[in-house]
Image (cartoon, rainbow, N blue to C red):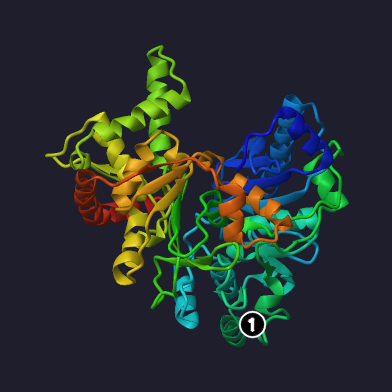
Amino acid sequence: MGHIMTGDKIRKELESGLCSLGIEFGSTRIKAILISSDKSPVASGAYDWENRLEDGIWTYSIDDILTGLKGCYHELKKDVLSKYGVRLANLKAIGISAMMHGYMPFDADGNLLSPFRTWRNNITEKESEELTELFSYPIPQRWTISHLFKDMKEQKAYLTVLDHVSTLACYVHTILTGKHVIGIGDASGMFPIDTETKDYLESALSVFDEKFVIGKYEWTIKDVLPEVLVAGNEAGCLTKEGALLLDEEGDLKEGIPFCPPEGDAETGMMATNAVRARSGNVSAGTSVFASIVLEKPLKKAYSQLDIVTTPDGRQVAMAHSNNCTGSYDMWIRMFDEVLKALGVHVSKGELYDRLLSLALEADPAAGGLVSYPYLSGEHITGFSSGCLMHLIPDDAELSISSFMRSELFASLSAMRIGLDILFEKEGVTIDMISGHGGFFKTPSVGQTIMAAVTKTPCRVLSTAGEGGAWGIALLADYLSSDKSLERYLDEDVFRNAESSVVYPRKEDMEGYEKYLERYKKGLCVERKAVETFSEEGQYV
């Protein structure tokens, strides 16, 4: 990015419709970021939301989605008016991104036929195993095709009127543009992708139809999947109805072009400049996933690894863990309640920084403690549901510093088990991993822990806090570029970007290896806890 623009220049760009908008639906927050022509964020808006466990399904309702979309845009519009005195009416381009995977089936009138299932649902183990064998391609439980296949096996009545299936980003894009299309990265969390043709894998489409669809339904699998587009493709324009949905005050003009809707993994790649081979990034927040851009395909399929793509269609191996910061978020909220009960007020930011920083003062192996942050299931370690648990052996050191270190180590340990397959069995190597997300907010703490766990230098860019909303805003801006995606990021976005790098220390790596050994041994205890409470219906 170039020099910071003056307020007057930003105001002129806003009035001329030269700014690009990105909106990302995260697990706990919907965020909008507006960027100017120099790719810098100039305004933002946010809306907090939370998924619910209903009838054993982690979900958000359509009302949740629409209310959050409107609320997020409303806050952005207020920010623009407050900062620049401009009523936002026109934009250069818009992009929508969201949590990858999940399942949203619709009829021809756009009615949702089954509750939205988010990525947190690990209820398709048998289906993912069958499809992985059928396709000779790893099909995780979170993928759209796993959920569709489950409902087909159960002969759900709605399938006779099924018109199309979507991810969350694809759905929001469709209601704003009228186009049922999807970015190749988000599509790679629905169905296998052929990185040569930049489309769904034809052999997988054919075998699925022949075995499960033909003669039973009037549609084929490709009929119901969204059309695949790559970065730089125009993916439709804002309709009149879409403009009024997004901006109920009626200021926003129709006709604004959209980039393909993308997943949060791909917007993370954008936000960390990790789209070329041998680059890697890790997004760590409610969930955590490490994405490594491959030089060549893996030798075999692994159930613990996803194969997805960059926004321009390069193959990426992803180690995805459902649980990351959620556990220690809960503990820190409880510590805050304790302080308030004692009449002490500490700001949320300061409380997080102070408590998390204590982890760097602890015994390198977390004092013998071990934690399981399983708020939901964890496919890498084989759990369809979860139970928060802390084990304190009789020789362990129970202190606040060791406790926080254990929580931070645990939040990355399922992901590390997946990465071990990639690095040890496939010989994949990377030079550095770029981090973004809430895990890295406290200076140096998240980086130090991530470097120890991955045994790799961890870089955090000065822009990392902007996250995926900035990443999808960049993809929207990229619509007008004639450069490759790599060159666009290198030359137009990150040329003068500042960053910090933390290198793994020997004592931290050795301490974590001891911790990981305990973590693996204790999985049988976590399994027993889940089985015990599942019988009472608490975690199913």
Q: Residue at the location (38% across, 33% down)? A: 331
Picture coordinates of residue 364, whole percent (x, y): 21, 41
Q: In which quadrant is the C terminus drawn? A: bottom left
Towards the viewer: 96 or 325? 96
Residue 256's place in the image compared with 421, above or below, is above
Picture coordinates of residue 455, whole percent (x, y): 29, 53
Picture coordinates of residue 12, whole percent (x, y): 80, 35
Q: Residue at the location (67% across, 66% down)? A: 165
**Label 1, on which residue?**
213
Kindly indicate the quadrant of the structure image that contains residue 74.
top right
Towards the viewer: 530 or 213? 213
Picture coordinates of residue 1, whole percent (x, y): 60, 43
440 left or right, relative to 514: right
Q: Residues within 10 Å of mark 1 (few under 14, many from 20)?
A: some
Q: Residue at the location (75% across, 33% down)? A: 9
Q: Among all residues in the image, which is located at the extreme top?
A: 343
Kindly indicate the quadrant of the structure image that contains residue 237.
bottom right
Q: Is residue 102 visible?
A: no
Residue 421's place in the image compared with 200, above or below, is above
Secondary element under disc 1, as helix, strand or loop, is: helix
Amino acid type assigned to the residue bearing label 1 in the image: Val
